[in-house]
Amino acid sequence: MKFERINSAPNFLRPVQKNSPNNTSQEIKKAAKRSNGIVISVSHDDYTRVVGGIQNIIGAEHLEFNKRGITYIHLCPELALRGLSKITKSADFKFSIRLDGRPLLSINGQELQNTLKQLQAQSKTPLWVFHHLMGHSPEVLQELLSHGTKKPLLWIHDYFAACSSFTLMRNDAAYCDAPPPQSTTCSSCKYGSNRQEHITRMRRFIEQTQPIITAPSQFALKQWSKVTGISPVDSVVIPPVRLTLEPVSRPEPSRTLRIAYIGRQDKHKGWDIYYQLAEAFRRDNRYKFFQFGKAPKGIFRQFNTTVRNVSVAVSARNRDAMVEALTRHKIDAVVCWSLWPETFNITVHEAMASGAFIIARRQQGNVWPVVSHHAPLASRALDSEGDLHAYFQAGQLHTDLLKSPCYRGKTIPSTGSVEVLT
C-alpha cells in the first residue's frame, strides 16, 4: 500500500535557525546538563502547529514537565504518513524535533542515538512517552529506547495498534471493529492490504518494549485490548481533563434554539451527519446551526447560511477557549455524533462545562458514559440518524431544555504522563 500524506500535518518544520544536526545534538546536551531530568515525547505531528486533542494533551504535558525543571524533547516524523514508515535503519529515518517547545533542525535516528548514548554516560538517561506512532518506524524507536530508563508509556488515544485506520473506519466510511486481516472486510478496504504487516510490527514493538499502556478512559483500555488482542502487562487510566460543575439557572430558551457542532469537519467525528441535519432544518426558524473550530473547507464554504462558523483555537495555554466561546454565543445544545468508539472526547467535556444540553449518539465509545455520569438530566441519547432528525422535527429539544437542570464549570487538565513518570 502506498501511504498517503496527511493534509492537516505540516510537511514538516524547516526552522530558520542556522544550526546543523550536530548543533541540534549540542543543544540537547546543553539543556540536559542544567535540567532535573529528560523526557522524550513521540507523536505523529508538531503539537505546536496542529490543533487537536492529542496535541493539546502533549502541550499541557510539556508545560507540566517544564514546571518541574525537566527538559521536554518532542519527536515527530519529518515526513508525515498515514501508516508506519517502511524505513527500518536509524541512519535513514529523520525526526523533526522540539526542545522545550523550541524548534531545532531535523536529526536522523543514528545521530539521535549517539546523543542519547552520551547523555546516558553522564547519568542523564531519558524517560519515554509515546503518544502516537503514525509515520514512525517502530524498529528505529526500539533502538533509541535501549538508551532509556524505566518502562516507557504508550498512550492509546485511538486504535492505531490494530490498523493504520486509527479510528477503525473501513474506507473512512463505517466502523469495522477490527476483523481478522484475512477477512473480506479487510480485503475490500484501502487500509487492508498492509494491515497484517502493520499489526506484526506494532505487536513486536509492544512485546519487546513492554510499555505501560496509558489510557484516557477505562472504556479505551478495554476496547483497545479487544481490537488488538493484547492484554497489557501494566496499564493505567489517566483522563486528559476533569470537570468541575456547579448548578446554575438555565436561561429561558428562545424561540430559535442555537445548536452547535464542536471541532473539525471530520467524517469520523460526525460532521457529515451534523451538516445534513442543518441542511434539513435550514429553513426552520426553530433552529440556528453553528460550528465551533476551524472554518469549513471545500464545498462547505458555500453554505454559510446553513452553518455559521465561530473560529476557536484551544491550546495548552488557553484550555477554556471553547467553553468561553460556547457560553458567549449562548449555545443551547451541542450535537456529538462520532461514528467510531471514542477513547475520550474532550469536546463533549467542553460542551458540558459551557452548560449546553448534550445530544449524543449512544454507541460512540466513552462519550455517552461520561455524559450520563455528569449530565444525566441535561442530555439525550439517540441511536440513529433517523432518530436525530425525528427529535428535531418533533421539537422535543425545546421541551427537554425547559425541564432540564443546567451546570457550568471548567475543564481541568490532568498532568498526564507526569502522574506516572514522576
Image: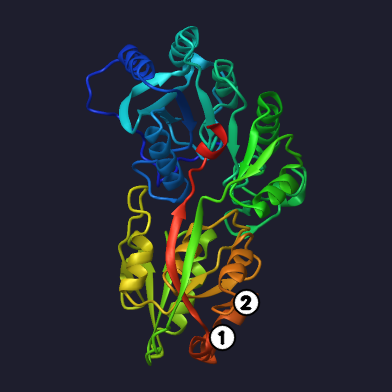
Task: Report how far apart the C-alphas of labels 2 and 1 lie in the structure.
Answer: 9 Å
Q: Quadrant of residue 35?
A: top left
In the picture of the structure, the residue carrying the numbered disc 2 is 382
The amino acid sitting under disc 2 is Leu
Residue 315 seen by the camera: yes
The amino acid sitting under disc 1 is Tyr
- Residue, x 63% and y 75% (percent of image)? 384
Q: In the displayed structure, does residue 79 sit left or right of residue 380?
A: left
Q: In the displayed structure, does residue 109 sit left or right of residue 258?
A: right
- Judging depth in this view, the residue of 150 and 157 nearest the camera is 150
Residue 3 seen by the camera: no
- Residue, x 65% and y 32% (percent of image)? 202
Q: Position of residue 57 (x, y in %)?
A: 46, 45
- Residue, x 49% and y 14% (percent of image)? 113
Indicate the quadrant containing the N terminus: top left, top right, bottom left or bottom right: top right
Q: Position of residue 204 (x, y in %)?
A: 70, 27
- Judging depth in this view, the residue of 186 and 140 nearest the camera is 140
Q: In the displayed structure, does residue 238 sit left or right of residue 203?
A: left
- Residue, x 41% and y 90% (percent of image)? 286
In the picture of the structure, the residue carrying the numbered disc 1 is 391
